[in-house]
Amino acid sequence: MKSANQEIRPVTTKINSKGNIEIGGCDLVELAEKYSTPLYVFDEQTIRSMTQSYKSAFKAYPKMRMMYAAKAFMTKAICKIMQEEGFGLDLCSGGEIFTAKTSGFDMSKTLFNGNNKSPEEINMAIEYGIGTISVDNFFELALLNNAAQSYNKQIRILLRITPGIECHTHEYIQTGHLDSKFGFDLTQVDEAIDLIKNEYNNLNIVGLHAHIGSQIFERRVYFDEVDVIFKEIKRIKDRHNILLKEINLGGGLGIKYTDSDKPISVDEIAQTIIESIKTHSTKYGIEEPVVFIEPGRSLVGTSGVTLYTAGSSKQVPKGRKYQAVDGGMADNARPSLYQAKYTVDIANKPNENKDKKVTISGRFCESGDILAKDILLPEIEEGDIICFYDTGAYGYSMASNYNRVLKPAAVLVNNGKSDIIINRQTYEDLCGLDVIPDRLS
Ligand SMILES: *Cc1c(COP(=O)(O)O)cnc(C)c1O
């Protein structure tokens, strides 16, 4: 079955009787008026359609556990939705741990992950009752064991390994290849386990963790990833007499940003993973483990759109037409960071022909602040509401205050209702952390 990550637009997208685009029963032009722009709009039904797709696709494997990689987009409201949907959370900073905890999230269903967790963050994770910690390197093993000792606690850990699998995605979002900053090389696993067995008595190793990359369109890499992990579990069992009963395969399922993207469905990735688990547990004689996946982008990416208002424009003589909008690289870093491409509509002109070539530029003081290069749209006029699709993941979460421009608001829409889930920053918020030393005042 098709899943929402294979659609460019949120599942509730329609053209309404006013001739405007609506999402979640809310007219985008009205949302722009009510909340001002730039505005992040998240469609609750699209998020829930993805969580449901994951749950039903993996039904055939009862020992499956789902987590949401919160770095894709995290707010307390999203934590609530994930909790309701029965998902855990994959967290990668003190800020994410704090957000989860203060949203009331069941911390036993969280995993703390990252290649340079600070001592303060590790202490916080322990104090807040983190479920499991994915240990990335030798330095962290020692740090974590010390912290666990001082709290007199046993900590459940996974070892993050680098499986040596290359997937065809942007270099910056590959993580599973051998020369990666993340995780233990497979040749270092024995030493890590010896240390845990002999010295680090407060660490309780329960499994292995890997994550091969992001925006992945291939099934084969997941099959191979499971193979590498099972082979390692078998090796660890034979050599150390320890049977690891949990594996975490990471996230990575791709979404459709433009017509040329052909992501696989949640059903397809689930079939591949389950088939590989069955194949390799038989092949290596290993009892079927508890298997975690932790998608980020595919759970929220398609649900989110960004609305901008068209402002100034510039026709370069014999060159490009630039149309500026009231946001840009500070609310969406992906085009300047990864040359990411998006599909764009004019929310108040959905029926007009897309026959004018235009480059949508941001308002920030960088020539690289281009949101979409040489795309086709109807003629844009000042005040038009420009809608960028698929900005739900790694959009707001990478937002900055570059040029001291305020971070946008985010609203959640459903059945004709819109609710703020992140307020727009205010100038007071912006200067709230500034301090003028006495000698300058
Ligand atoms: C970022 C990340 C994910 C989520 O990746 P997506 O491509 O957004 O699904 C999952 N696991 C780990 C360890 C990550 O770092």
Image: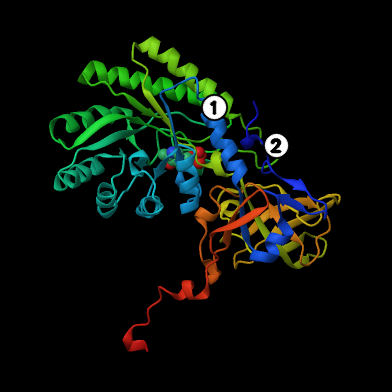
Q: Quadrant of residue 288?
A: top left
The dot on residue 276 is: none
Label 2 element class: loop
**Disc 2 to disc 1, how far (Cα)?**
27 Å
Question: Which residue occupies the foreground of this view, 151 or 207?
Answer: 151
The answer to whether residue 325 shows anywhere in this view is no
| Left or right of 115 on screen, residue 14 | right
Front: mark 2 or 1: 1
**Residue holding disc 2:** 260
Residue lying at 33% horizontally and 22% vertically, measured from the top left: 232
Residue lying at 22% horizontally and 18% vertically, measured from the top left: 239
The quadrant of the rendering that contains the N terminus is top right
**Residue holding disc 1:** 56
The color scheme shown is rainbow
- The picture places residue 431, in percent across and down from the top left corner, at 46, 75
**Which numbered disc, 2 or 1, marks the residue that appears first in the sequence?**
1
Question: Which residue occupies the foreground of this view, 422 or 302?
Answer: 422
Asked whether disc 2 touches disc 1, contact meaning CB atoms under 8 Å apart, the reply is: no
> Which amino acid type corresponds to the residue marked 1 in the rendered image?
Ser
- The picture places residue 190, in percent across and down from the top left corner, at 24, 27
> Which amino acid type corresponds to the residue marked 2 in the rendered image?
Ser
Q: Quadrant of residue 382?
A: bottom right
Residue lying at 41% horizontally and 52% vertically, measured from the top left: 103
